[in-house]
């Protein structure tokens, strides 16, 4: 009798384990096939092993309970499982990236609530309803099969004589789960299958795509805990200063020059071309400037420049110990970038910084967007610019405002502003007596901007819809950027020098002529342009372009007003996107973005292709000179260091992961998944493949390893700034040394 009961109990326990394991594996497969186009065979193996582990462990715990408790707790677990996958699925459909826990809790909740109409459209359509049903299928099947699954389990609580038997089943399940997990770890760590993603190059989206959402969330929790409790380890290498090896030109390296005019003086920008694998192993992009007298025929003489560095002694700080000693030690090993002929070129001028919602360089056209075209070609021209898409709009703002990668996702701005800010343009120009304001033509509390944007150092405060701006602009969705400019310019135009930051909204999705007020407003202009150019864009692409024409109108009004007041030559306009136009494709992933590919004019299959865009830095004083061309790779984290150099503020180039693009610093763009690009080529971290810019170039493995190490260190630094409030530490040290 006892053996019979034991066999029945064992069968019931096994059935529960199988059902839960299959439920986990099934939902992982549905999610993966729904949000990813490019698959690797190994990822399905990991999904199976991690799902089996989860099913065994959970079933082992649940089977300790009586049948009634099992019948209540199991559907709760299945419902929670379905809810997680449904939320992440909807997030991916809306934003085209997987959101980590920080972003879900701090940003996606606002986004899902604030853009309720968009979310409802995602849910109440065939794609939404069918996928939600698929994710809920295990939960539904439980109520059909629960008697068959739990029929062999005891109806009452565990009695003393059954305790050993129950513990045996629990330990057996636990051992099975551990074996599955161990097998997965063996494949990852010992066989080298995606080892970097699991360890020193962890990225939530990459982890989800390779190991599944369940394991991705476990790794995210692990990293959240470690970020708060452990110091971040920097790699002990010399690679951050390897650019010094290129300070002395080699006779074997041909030098080509480009002439640029700045304020009437001529600058020679020299770029060294590596002629061998050994030279390719160093960071060869070395910029040297020269000054020339007003006479065209006079000899160009070299000019010695200082370094963009503060007075803080990081070596001494590291020696003093403390929580930030390891970070201080790392910073002390870095070589500051050099000042240059552009240093202080904009000192004392006004600054208008615009983070443009879903803006793309593909929009810029001499006839359709003449003002944006003018600004992008008559100032500093970024010909190879990227806007890393991490944590949506709030992540894009963080990159622009602080020159760091948002390693805490949607909570990055909240974390860095908790104790005030010291390194962004709001604070730096406020120290120079600038009047400052920041504006957003949408809900002022969105992404907690009422808490974060009031701490950016803008003396005049922050205004959005809900704390004053609602009385000035029309209640449309999305709101008009033109109205935003018309109503806010009088607030600061006569308070020079001024420093203003805008987060626009006109370019926001959804992109159709029925639901988007800005698309409807500018539909005729886009249709006429398409007809004139014989362009057969689909409706979503035309609606996207039409929505962004409102930004063109806003910038046109801005420039016209500056010129009427005679201060265009004393005002700098900087325009940067917050992210790529993720709202163009509703059912999309890398390799399956037809509308985005149509807008860009090429297939979008990689992060590099997806995030390529355009940045603008313009000043009226530049228009009479030849444009300043930046052909090397640049990204959103480079904008703040470049502005710091141009405005001549006191800053330390070692405290930013980006670079002053006009300096001798390494031209390096890196993405959240540790892919990177330099002037020599692009590296795909997932496939471990480096593609040279010049297909005939012979790039050594050491070069790839060195740059990858630099990228890991800079990601670690971005994490450390948040987890250790590092900027406050440096600010206090600087104050103490004065």
Image: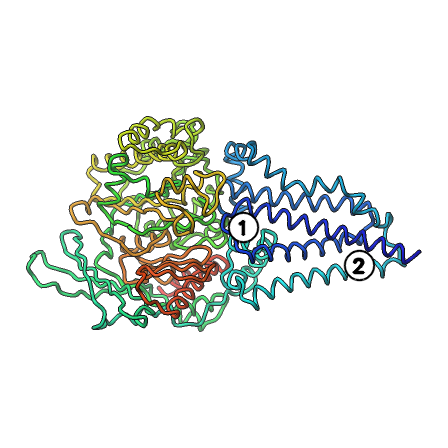
Q: Nearer the viewer, mark 1 or mark 2?
A: 2
- Look at 18% across and 54% down and name the residue there: 260
Q: Residue 481 at what x, y percent from top left?
A: 35, 34
- Look at 84% across and 53% down and name the residue there: 9
Residue that badge 2 annotates? 169
Q: Residue 113 at what x, y percent from top left?
A: 54, 36
Q: Is residue 85 above or below residue 540?
A: below
How far is the residue under mark 1 from the one under mark 2?
34 Å
Residue that badge 1 annotates? 100
Q: In the rendered image, is residue 498 in sight?
A: yes
Q: Secondary structure at mark 2?
A: helix
Mark 1 or mark 2: which comes first in sequence?
Answer: 1
Q: Residue 534 at what x, y percent from top left?
A: 29, 32
The quarter of the image holding the N terminus is bottom right
- Look at 15% across and 56% down and name the residue there: 266
Q: Is residue 457 above or below residue 696?
A: above
Q: In the rendered image, is residue 313 in sight?
A: no
Instruction: Identify the disc placed on residue 143.
Output: none
Q: Do callouts 1 and 2 mark residues in contact (Cβ within 8 Å)?
A: no
Q: Secondary structure at mark 1?
A: loop
For the residue pair 303 and 586, the one nearer the viewer reads as 586
Q: Residues within 10 Å of mark 1 (few under 14, many from 20)?
A: many
The quarter of the image holding the C terminus is bottom left
Q: Is residue 550 left or right of residue 718?
A: left
Q: Residue 567 at what x, y percent from top left?
A: 21, 40
**Residue that sits furthest to the right in the current view:** 1
Which image quarter: residue 474? top left
């Amino acid at each position: 009798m006892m053996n019979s009961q034991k066999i029945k109990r064992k069968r019931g326990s096994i059935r529960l384990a199988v059902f839960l394991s299959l439920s986990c594996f099934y939902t992982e497969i549905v999610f993966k096939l729904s949000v990813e186009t490019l698959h690797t065979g190994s990822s399905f193996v990991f999904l199976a092993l991690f799902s089996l582990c989860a099913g065994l462990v959970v079933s082992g715990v649940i089977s300790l309970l009586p049948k009634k408790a099992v019948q209540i707790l199991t559907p709760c677990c299945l419902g929670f499982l379905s809810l997680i996958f449904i939320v992440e699925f909807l997030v991916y459909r809306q934003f085209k990236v997987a959101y980590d826990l920080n972003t879900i809790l701090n940003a996606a909740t606002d986004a899902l609530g604030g853009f309720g109409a968009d979310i409802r459209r995602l849910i109440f359509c065939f794609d939404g309803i069918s996928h939600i049903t698929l994710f809920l299928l295990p939960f539904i099947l439980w109520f059909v099969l629960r008697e068959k699954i739990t029929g062999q389990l005891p109806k009452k609580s565990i009695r003393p004589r059954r305790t050993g038997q129950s513990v045996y089943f629990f330990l057996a399940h636990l051992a099975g789960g551990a074996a599955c997990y161990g097998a997965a770890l063996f494949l990852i760590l010992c066989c080298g299958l995606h080892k970097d993603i699991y360890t020193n190059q962890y990225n939530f989206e990459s982890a989800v795509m390779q190991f599944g959402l369940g394991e991705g969330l476990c790794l995210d929790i692990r990293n959240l805990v470690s970020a708060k409790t452990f110091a971040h380890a920097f790699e002990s290498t010399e690679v951050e200063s390897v650019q010094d090896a290129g300070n002395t030109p080699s006779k074997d390296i041909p030098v080509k020059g480009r002439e640029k005019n700045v304020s009437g003086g001529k600058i020679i920008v020299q770029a060294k071309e590596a002629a061998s694998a050994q030279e390719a192993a160093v960071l060869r992009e070395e910029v040297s400037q020269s000054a020339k007298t007003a006479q065209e025929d006079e000899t160009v003489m070299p000019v010695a420049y200082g370094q963009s560095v503060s007075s803080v002694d990081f070596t001494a700080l590291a020696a003093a110990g403390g929580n930030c000693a390891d970070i201080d030690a790392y910073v002390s090993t870095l070589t500051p970038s050099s000042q240059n002929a552009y240093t202080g070129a904009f000192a004392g001028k006004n600054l208008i910084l615009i983070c443009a919602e879903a803006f793309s360089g593909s929009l810029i056209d001499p006839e359709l967007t003449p003002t944006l075209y003018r600004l992008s070609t008559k100032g500093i021209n970024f010909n190879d610019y990227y806007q890393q898409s991490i944590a949506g709009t709030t992540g894009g703002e963080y990159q622009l405002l602080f020159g760091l990668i948002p390693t805490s996702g949607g909570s990055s701005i909240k974390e860095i502003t908790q104790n005030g800010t010291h390194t962004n343009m709001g604070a730096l120009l406020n120290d120079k007596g600038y009047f400052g304001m920041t504006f957003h033509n949408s809900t002022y509390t969105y992404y907690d901007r009422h808490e974060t944007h009031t701490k950016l150092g803008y003396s005049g405060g922050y205004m959005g819809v809900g704390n004053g701006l609602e009385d000035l602009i029309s209640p449309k969705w999305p709101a008009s950027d033109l109205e935003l400019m018309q109503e806010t310019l009088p607030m600061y135009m006569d308070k020079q020098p001024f420093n203003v930051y805008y987060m626009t909204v006109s370019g926001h999705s959804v992109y159709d002529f029925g639901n988007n007020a800005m698309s409807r407003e500018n539909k005729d202009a886009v249709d006429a342009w398409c007809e004139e150019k014989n362009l057969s864009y689909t409706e979503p692409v035309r609606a996207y372009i039409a929505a962004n024409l409102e930004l063109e109108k806003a910038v046109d009004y801005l420039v016209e007003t500056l010129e009427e007041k005679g201060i265009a030559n004393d005002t700098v306009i900087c325009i940067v996107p917050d992210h790529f136009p993720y709202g163009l494709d509703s059912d999309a992933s890398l390799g399956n973005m037809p509308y985005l590919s149509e807008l860009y004019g090429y297939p979008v299959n990689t992060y590099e292709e997806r995030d390529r865009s355009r940045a603008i830095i313009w000043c009226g004083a530049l228009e009479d000179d030849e444009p300043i061309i930046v052909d090397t790779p640049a990204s959103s984290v480079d904008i703040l260091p470049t502005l710091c150099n141009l405005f001549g503020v006191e800053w330390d180039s070692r405290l930013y992961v980006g670079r002053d693009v006009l300096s001798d610093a390494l031209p390096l763009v890196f993405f959240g998944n540790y892919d990177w690009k330099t002037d020599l080529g692009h590296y795909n971290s997932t496939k471990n493949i480096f593609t040279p810019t010049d297909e005939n170039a012979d790039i050594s493995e050491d070069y790839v390893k060195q740059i990858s190490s630099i990228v890991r260190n800079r990601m670690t630094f971005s994490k450390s700034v948040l987890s250790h409030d590092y900027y406050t530490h440096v600010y206090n040290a600087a104050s103490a040394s004065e």
